[in-house]
Image (cartoon, rainbow, N blue to C red):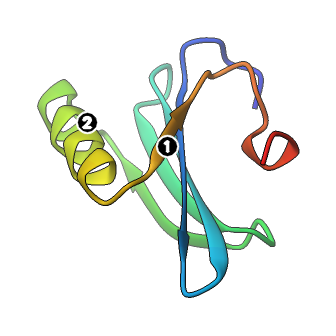
Amino acid sequence: MGNKNQRIWIWQHDAELYKAVYNPAERTFLVSNERDETILRYKGITAEQLARLETLFLQCGAKHLDGHKEPFTYL
């Protein structure tokens, strides 16, 4: 990880943790499970798409974490 500008969200679904990471330098969006297995990967995310995704995550109860932290370390 390490990019101070990336955005990270975490949430739990059916007793499993999930993590979504947006990397603005590469405009990529990655969703993975607690075993770091990639579930979804998107390239070329626009600012508008990112805003919609962030709203959706927050509505679903995801927690937004500072980009400097590895989410699973702080749960």
Residue 42: give x, y in percent of width and height. 39, 55
Residue 49: give x, y in percent of width and height. 17, 40
Q: Is residue 10 above or below residue 15?
A: above
Q: Which mark is residue 50?
A: 2
Query: What residue is shown at x 45% (from left), y 41% (from top)?
Result: 28
Question: How many residues crowd mark 2 within 10 Å: few (<14), some (14–19), many (20+)?
Answer: some
Which residue is most to the right?
73
Question: How many residues crowd mark 1 within 10 Å: few (<14), some (14–19), many (20+)?
Answer: some
Residue 51: give x, y in percent of width and height. 20, 32
- Disc 1 residue type (three-letter): Lys
Left or right of 47? Residue 43 is: right
Q: Which mark is nearer the camera, 1 or 2?
A: 1
Q: Mark 1 or mark 2, which has the lower sequence index?
A: 2
Q: Is residue 33 above or below residue 44?
A: below
Q: Secondary structure at mark 2?
A: helix
**Occupied quadrant, residue 61:** bottom left
